[in-house]
Amino acid sequence: MSRRPNTSRRFADSGSIPFVGALHPKSRPSPLLSVGLVVVGALLIVGYLYHGSGGRSSNIAALNRLDDAQQTFAFSSKELIQIHLNSVCYCAYDVQGGVSCTLELQKLVPLLKKAYGDSMRTVLHVGPETCSVVSQLLKEEDTEAWGVEPYELDDADGNCRSLVHKGIVRVADIKFPLPYKAKSFSLVIVSDAVDYLSPRYLNKTVPELARVASDGLVILSGYPGHQRAKVAELSKFGRPAKFRSSSWWVKFFIQNGLEENETAIKKFEQAAAKKSYKPSCQVFHLKSLH
């Protein structure tokens, strides 16, 4: 394979700089070259003066078109940058596994307080990251809170370990009966838990969640197509999340002796409207038919 000659080395070896001869004091430009340059310059000046009167408006128009083009380019560039940023945000959203209903719940706590009022006096949260939810609920006035973590507590911080040590948070498999008496809590809130259960276990778990609630059951579920489990989480949750439509859930709730809590729904929607807030997860407000 041919190789390009290393001209820099050749110049260095010769101890000279290319074209240095043209700049040497002994090298004088040709008189004909000087005359030619003067003639060309004169012709350019004559041409400019000739077109000066008739071409001024066209020059201004050309400058205006250039300015418009620059503004259009600047605007298009901003649009392209915004589109790119939106794409980056969407990709990050997708890579991270979609919306977390547990994180969404932490935003909804003030709205739930408006909807349930005194029914928020004793609350049980069921779902991953329950230590964070319980810690937030405990800061609310006149509210006591407990939590059930359905999965293993990985890398729990000091606050979470303290909640577990005090018995406020428990690690329990929700496919089996909960370790609480009937109507132990005024309100039970569930997030990021039922989406990972098959219908076989849902038929047992959801009635069990309703059993320990006296005033209401709130279930947060992902929208179909809007949320996917991380591959790394499959070993933790045991199966990919299955996100069902609201009509599927309503039918399921009726079959299991539950109905929608119309009063709570109305208050919740009013509170959300005042905040111009739209939840990223489906929120079901339920109560027992019996």
Image (cartoon, grey):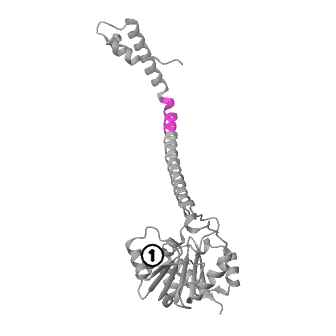
Residue 14: x percent and y percent? 34, 11
Number of numbered discs on residues: 1
> Could you tell me which residue is drawn at 52 percent across and 40 percent down?
65
Residue beneath label 1, please?
A: 131
- Residue found 37% across the figure and 17% down from its top: 9
Q: Is residue 57 magenta?
A: yes
Q: Position of residue 72 (x, y in %)?
A: 52, 46
Q: Which quadrant of the figure has residue 23? A: top left
Residue 261 visible in the displayed image: no
Q: What residue sits 63% from the left and 73% below the top?
A: 197
Looking at the rendered image, the quarter that the C terminus falls into is bottom right
Secondary structure, magenta segment, majority class = helix
Q: Nearer the viewer, residue 127 or 248?
A: 127
Residue 251 lies, in percent from the top left, at 70, 80
Q: Residue at x 34, y 16 (%)?
A: 12
Instruction: State the residue in front, 60 or 257.
Output: 257
Q: Is residue 18 above or below residue 152?
A: above
What is the quadrant of the N terminus in the image? top right
Q: Is residue 161 visible?
A: yes
Q: Is residue 81 magenta?
A: no
| SS for callout 1 | helix
Q: Residues within 10 Å of mark 1 (few under 14, many from 20)?
A: many
Range of residues picked out in magenta: 53-63
Q: Is residue 160 left or right of residue 185?
A: left
Q: Position of residue 206 (x, y in %)?
A: 62, 81
Given the current orientation, which residue lies at the most extreme bottom position?
A: 290
Identified by mark 1, the residue type is Cys
